[in-house]
Image (cartoon, rainbow, N blue to C red):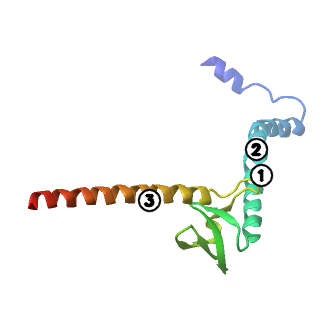
Amino acid sequence: MFASTAYALAPAPQGGADAGFMASISGFMPILLIIVIFYFFMIRPQQKKAKAHQEMLRSLKKGDAVITNGGMYGRIVEFQDDIAAVDLGEHTVFILRGALTVLSPNQKSPLPPLKEKMKKKKSAARADDEAALKETEDKKEDKEE
């Protein structure tokens, strides 16, 4: 009880008005340091990335290979304002320009190899279906005889 009263009655530190100002600034230094660190390690790189993405969206042109935000690969067929017609192989979809990303120059679209692979799977599945249909027809003919 007496110790707290003794501290409260202690004389003010010497140094005048400058000492009080420096003490208040030194209390804010850790907060200011954290703000500066956040700016240089989080905010600034995010702003640069957003600016580069906007520039890339402005430079899109017909025939560019793109990936949508949904993960679909395709090529731009046509633009109308902020809407792009994107050929996805068998289908053409209309997507907002902001929902597109460009493939890097050294990365090629996987569409041609995938198309060939899908054609092989479809033909194999079709052959299996035809074999199963023929087998059921043969069984029906056997039952009828």
Residue 62's spot in the image, x, y percent?
71, 74
Q: Nearer the viewer, mark 2 or mark 3?
A: 3
**Looking at the image, which residue is at 88% across and 39% down?**
17
Q: What element carries label 2?
A: helix
Check disc 1 and give the amino acid type.
Arg
Residue for badge 2: 41
Q: Quick check: can you spot residue 131?
A: yes
Disc sitting over residue 44 in the figure: 1
Of callouts 1 and 3, the N-terminal one: 1
Q: Which of marks 1 and 3 is in front?
A: 3
Residue 12's spot in the image, x, y percent?
81, 30
Q: Foreground: 104 or 130?
A: 130
Assign the C terminus to one quadrant of the image: bottom left
Instruction: Using the rendered view, name the quadrant where residue 34 is placed.
Output: top right
Q: Is residue 61 above or below residue 72?
A: below
Instruction: Using the rendered view, name the quadrant where residue 61 is placed.
Output: bottom right
Check disc 2 and give the amino acid type.
Phe
Marks 1 and 2, how far apart at CA: 7 Å
Of callouts 2 and 3, the N-terminal one: 2
Assign the N terminus to one quadrant of the image: top right
